[in-house]
Image: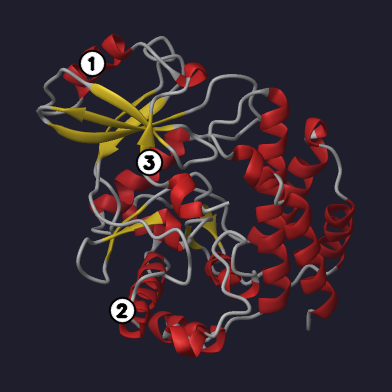
Amino acid sequence: MNRTEANSGTREVSERLRFDEAALVLWMEGNVAGFRGPLSVQQFKGGQSNPTYRLDSPSGSYVLRRKPPGKLLPGAHAVDREYRVLAALGAAAFPVPRVHGLCEDETVIGTPFYVMDMVEGRIVWEAQFPGMSKQERAAHFDAMNATIARLHSFDPQAIGLGDYGRAGGFVERQVARWSKQYEGDVEAGRVPAMDRLVAWLRANLPGDSGDSRVVHGDFRCDNMIFAANEPRVAAVLDWELSTLGDPAADFVYHLMMYRMPAGMFTGLAGLDLDELGIPSEKEYIEAYCRRTGRDGLPHVDYLAVFVMFRLAAICHGIRGRLARGSASSAHAEATAAVTDPLAELAWKQAESARL
């Protein structure tokens, strides 16, 4: 799958995800300062979980994120949590879109939703940053590194997110959560490598780091908007998996690009990083540690297995949503197909892990 072509831009809203646009206009008139209709609605091609729409009007352009219709797994698609973390981080001057309002009244468009600003800029769908010079790639990687380091520098209590998750025991809880979600999604079927990973992760749990920060949960180059003409992160998107947790695990998820082959999500393995101007995994870790005042990252190999397993579990969940008829993305089938090879790759990481 060409991820850039598959995810870039908008399309006509699919039949299953249409809603009463007149009802949305009435809600926006009462909740979005300065809004003026009429409204034009398109669906973004990307977005596997919460359907996302571009709203254009005489007063400006906005983005709507909603919980998908249909049968959903408990606790998933929490747009209210997305709204809360965006509001808090925006107030702390972290680069996120400005939010305008949250609607939990399902009678408006059928499911809860929120509206935020449309941030103009560039989304890069491949981690090798195609079409850039070596210097430009290096600068964009440095910008990503600085942005996640800044996120992990916030005191959750100080920005109003002290109760956004449980402090301590993050990795253990996450292993339990995603194992349960994988094992409980019967419509998606079982994957032998996933079964082995569940057992390995439970048997090799590291000690609790005790370090609790706001974590994004899916920090990748394609979940941020870069400024149009400079290597600066203008906005970080897709906060559905955010919580309070171990920042090392969040950063290692971002590092996963170094251990996945090119062509699998945003993979870099097998590419000549020096020729591309991309820092090595070791150099990228060192830059993050300098910025966050760490001596190093503990349990990197274990965390690498865990984050790959978690991503495979997310793909497995998309397979389940396809079976239940609630998948929101046009390329959900291609993403679901990655479940097995990604689980196998995670198992290879487990076999070679130095614990």
First reached walking from the N terminus: tag 2 or tag 1: 1
Q: Amino acid at mark 2?
A: Glu
Residue at coordinates 63% horizontally, 46% vertically from top-left?
335
Label 2 to label 3: alpha-carbon separation: 34 Å
Residue located beneath label 1 in the image = 25
Which quadrant of the figure contains the C terminus?
bottom right
First reached walking from the N terminus: tag 1 or tag 3: 1
Q: Amino acid at mark 1?
A: Val
Quadrant for residue 61, please give it: top left
Quadrant for residue 43, please give it: top left
Position of residue 197 measured from the top left corner of the image (x, y, whole percent)? 83, 60
Residue at coordinates 27% horizontally, 47% vertically from top-left?
97
| Other residues around mark 3 within 10 Å, as few (<14) / some (14–19) / many (≥20) | some
Residue 67 visible in image: yes
Q: Which mark is residue 136?
A: 2
| Other residues around mark 1 within 10 Å, as few (<14) / some (14–19) / many (≥20) | some
Q: Is residue 3 above or below residue 147?
A: above
State the residue in front, 340 or 8. Answer: 8
- SS for dot 1: helix
Position of residue 285 measured from the top left corner of the image (x, y, whole percent)? 51, 83
- SS for dot 2: helix
Q: Is residue 340 above or below residue 327?
A: below
Q: Amino acid at mark 3?
A: Arg
**Left or right of 201, for residue 322:** left
Residue located beneath label 3 in the image = 84
